[in-house]
Amino acid sequence: MSVSEEDLVFLERAVALAREAAAAGDGAFGSVLVDASRVERFADRNREVTLGDETRHPEFEIARWAATNLTTAERAGATVYTSAEHCPMCSAAHAWVGLGRIVYAASAAQVSAWRAEVGLAPSPVAVLPITIVAPGLVVDGPVDRYAGELRSLILGAPMES
Ligand SMILES: [Zn+2]
């Protein structure tokens, strides 16, 4: 599947949540859950700094919310839009609760490379594509138009124009 104009509307919303997270001092990541009727049902942003819990990733919150609030069929028909590709923890949670397609703006490999470029410590968790952790998932990304802004937000650097 390719990324449609409608997908970009929801992806933009995920990137806006990443901006919000960065402004709050959290990791610059945001995610949105959209149901099969193309209605946003839940959204969150990274809260690992403000909550002092490194597992407070928005994709993980989405999986938990979906498990509590959506039927199995609703989960399967839902799409998760996320500013950066799920980490292995979130890929596993997404797959365990049976959520559907994922569309991401930046890949995990891109984020890892950006961090390495400026000498930041690597993630304590292996950088693995979603489809390695959860081979059955339908995944689209990266979407290059967001790379410059996300790089700046994730590195806490001023925007490069
Ligand atoms: Zn994660």
Image (cartoon, rainbow, N blue to C red):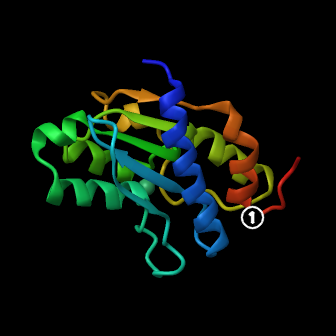
In the image: residue 145, left or right of residue 134 = right
Q: Quadrant of the N terminus?
A: top left
Which of 29/89 is in front?
29
Structural crowding at the residue carrying mark 1, measured as other residues with C-alpha within 10 Å and reported as few (<14), some (14–19) or many (≥20): some
| Amino acid of disc 1 | Gly
In the image: residue 148, left or right of residue 75 = right
Q: What residue occupies the far right of the structure in this picture?
A: 161
Could you say whether the residue bearing mark 1 is in a helix, strand or loop?
Answer: loop
How many numbered badges does the structure rendering display? 1
Mark 1 lies on residue? 156
Is residue 73 in view?
yes
Is residue 129 in view?
no
Q: Position of residue 129 (x, y in %)?
A: 46, 36
Look at the picture and state if 1 lies above or below 148.
above
Q: Residue at x 63, y 47 (%)?
A: 112
In the image: residue 15, left or right of residue 55 = right
Q: Position of residue 110 (x, y in %)?
A: 65, 40
Q: Position of residue 11 (x, y in %)?
A: 53, 41
Q: Position of residue 87 (x, y in %)?
A: 45, 49
In the image: residue 44, left or right of residue 41 = right
